């Protein structure tokens, strides 16, 4: 077994792939056999990092960055095959899934099919004394968030999926008698939602352990903001800028820039940082504690917001009339470290980064990000160009918010493409792997490659278009697309640039199994 150090990995590399993008499953990727096969591919390819997006139940537009809870797991990721192996589903339960073409993901179909099977599995678990005890123990361990989340989801189902601010006023205000009546009336649905969380964390924990045993660390995402229509905001209204009806009074976003003349109005409610600070940032401590129970390295999304956030009056339709308001990020991370100790964090420092933001990142010792697609078309001083990278950074060919490297390159003006070709000394015919080589060769201590670039896919495989409300997050990996040849090529480059730390056991396995490559993913 490979030992997993709590310290930040050095000269490491890995792939970016959200579990919903895996093949197999019932409408979308899940935590079943294909997830383990992907871990096996990472190990064979000499990769020791797997970056994912937030694992929470997605909300508006199926975005994992607008989850119904900052603490819960996505029930669509639960493997029905694993539940069957546990004796909670039968072969007949698994039949009849409409899982035709592998891409795009069919989230609605997956929710309909899996939802019914989760109810059946919950009933079977609760019919067994030992199973009931397991579920009860899990609920007790997760008292800080699970009861509120399960009740929130049951109420949301009861009210046709409408936002919680449209519920009866006594439920919006969380009056004790109203909540007690709801818990009694919705006991069965609450049980199902709690069971789904038990199943998710049981399966995710097993997958993470399997990855760690192969020498693969998981990089998980923590968005700075949470969705308004979430259990977090409903349960802790005191922590957010809301009016008496629960509606936000100020919302998050970013100001106008070269890419958008009206800025971006995200709409997330903003925190009452004064209240959080008075409470010792306890909510944030618990959020990081929960995340560290599921991942090995934390990527903090929109790190810029921990120095100052763009406050937009909620009645404004654009982000133009906002203002910067400073955030007590220094005190927040001091409180988190005091409670949880030191742990590896990557700061997503893309966009408008001021000297104050950079100073805070450096003071906290968090590596930032360098995206190669942002490097070209200007002068040699561009910080994203590989010759300007620093060791305490993480290099990406692109992220989930970018086009694929092939799609990006072919969409650029000739001046930018010429800059790329001259900089790398290439003709551009294998542009995805040219970028992969540059990322792995960088002095940055970590390098992350989206799987779409390993496969040299075009813009049709893009994961997300920022600002587009629908049609995102649905790309899926085709079964068999990742081959032994891809693994060999990645491993060669990782070894060439000193990135893969291979245990003796894993190295021996690679030699012994040289004539028997793993199944293609």
Image (cartoon, rainbow, N blue to C red):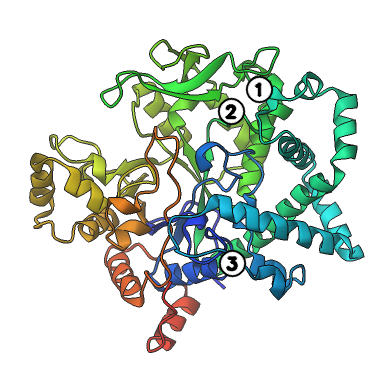
The residue beneath circle 1 is: 276
Which is more toward the observer, 2 or 26? 26
The residue beneath circle 3 is: 32
Q: Are marks 1 and 2 in contact (CB under 8 Å)?
A: yes
Disc nearer the start of the sequence (1/3): 3
Q: Residue at x 84, y 41 (%)?
A: 186
Query: Which quadrant holds the C terminus?
Result: bottom left
Residue 297, numbered label: none
Which quadrant of the view contains residue 281? top right
Q: CA distance from mark 1 to mark 2?
A: 9 Å
The residue beneath circle 2 is: 332
Per the image, label 2 sits on a secondary structure element best described as helix
Disc nearer the start of the sequence (2/3): 3
**Left/right of residue 115 with respect to residue 175 in the rendered view:** left
Density class for disc 2 (Cα within 10 Å; few <14, some 14-19, many ≥20) is: many
Per the image, label 3 sits on a secondary structure element best described as loop
């Amino acid at each position: 077994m490979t030992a997993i150090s709590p310290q930040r990995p050095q000269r490491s590399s890995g792939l970016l792939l959200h579990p919903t993008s895996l093949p197999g499953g019932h409408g979308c990727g899940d935590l079943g056999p294909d997830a383990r096969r992907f871990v096996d591919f990472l190990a064979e390819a000499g990769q020791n990092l797997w970056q994912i997006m937030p694992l929470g139940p997605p909300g508006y537009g199926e975005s994992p960055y607008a989850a119904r809870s900052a603490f819960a797991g996505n029930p669509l990721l639960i493997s029905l095959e694993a539940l069957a192996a546990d004796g909670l589903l039968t072969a007949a339960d698994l039949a009849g899934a409409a899982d035709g073409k592998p891409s795009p993901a069919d989230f609605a179909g997956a929710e309909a099919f899996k939802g019914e099977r989760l109810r059946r599995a919950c009933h079977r678990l609760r019919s067994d004394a030992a199973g009931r005890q397991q579920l009860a123990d899990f609920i007790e361990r997760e008292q800080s968030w699970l009861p509120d989340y399960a009740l929130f989801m049951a109420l949301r189902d009861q009210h046709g999926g409408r936002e919680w601010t449209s519920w009866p006023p006594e439920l919006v205000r969380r009056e004790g008698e109203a909540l007690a009546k709801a818990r009694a009336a919705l006991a069965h649905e609450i049980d199902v939602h709690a069971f789904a969380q038990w199943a998710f964390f049981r399966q995710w924990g097993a997958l993470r352990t399997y990855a760690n045993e192969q020498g693969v660390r998981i990089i998980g995402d923590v968005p700075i903001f949470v969705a308004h229509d979430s259990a977090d905001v409903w349960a802790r209204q005191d922590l957010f800028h809301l009016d008496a009806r629960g509606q936000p009074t100020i919302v998050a976003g970013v100001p106008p820039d070269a890419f958008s003349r009206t800025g971006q109005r995200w709409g997330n409610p903003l925190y009452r940082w004064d209240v959080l600070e008075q409470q010792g940032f306890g909510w944030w401590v618990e959020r990081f504690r929960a995340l560290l129970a599921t991942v090995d390295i934390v990527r903090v999304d929109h790190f810029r917001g921990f120095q100052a956030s763009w406050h937009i009056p909620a009645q404004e339709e654009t982000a133009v009339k906002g203002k910067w308001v400073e955030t007590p990020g220094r005190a927040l991370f001091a409180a988190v470290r005091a409670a949880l100790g030191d742990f590896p964090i990557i700061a997503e420092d893309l966009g408008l980064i001021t000297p104050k933001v950079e100073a805070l990142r450096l003071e906290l010792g968090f590596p930032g990000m360098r995206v190669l697609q942002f490097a070209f078309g200007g002068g040699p001083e561009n910080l994203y160009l590989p010759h300007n990278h620093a060791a305490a950074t993480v290099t990406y060919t692109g992220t989930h918010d970018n086009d694929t490297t092939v799609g990006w390159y072919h969409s650029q003006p000739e001046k930018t493409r010429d800059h790329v070709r001259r900089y790398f000394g290439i003709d551009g015919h294998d542009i995805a792997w040219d970028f992969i080589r540059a990322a792995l060769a960088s002095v940055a201590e970590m390098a992350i490659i989206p799987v779409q670039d390993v496969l040299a896919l075009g813009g049709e495989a893009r994961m997300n278009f920022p600002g587009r409300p629908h049609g995102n997050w649905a790309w899926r990996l085709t079964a068999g697309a990742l081959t032994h040849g891809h693994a060999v090529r990645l491993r060669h480059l990782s070894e060439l640039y000193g990135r893969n730390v291979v245990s003796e056991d894993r190295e021996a396995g690679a030699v012994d199994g040289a004539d028997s490559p793993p199944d293609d993913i």
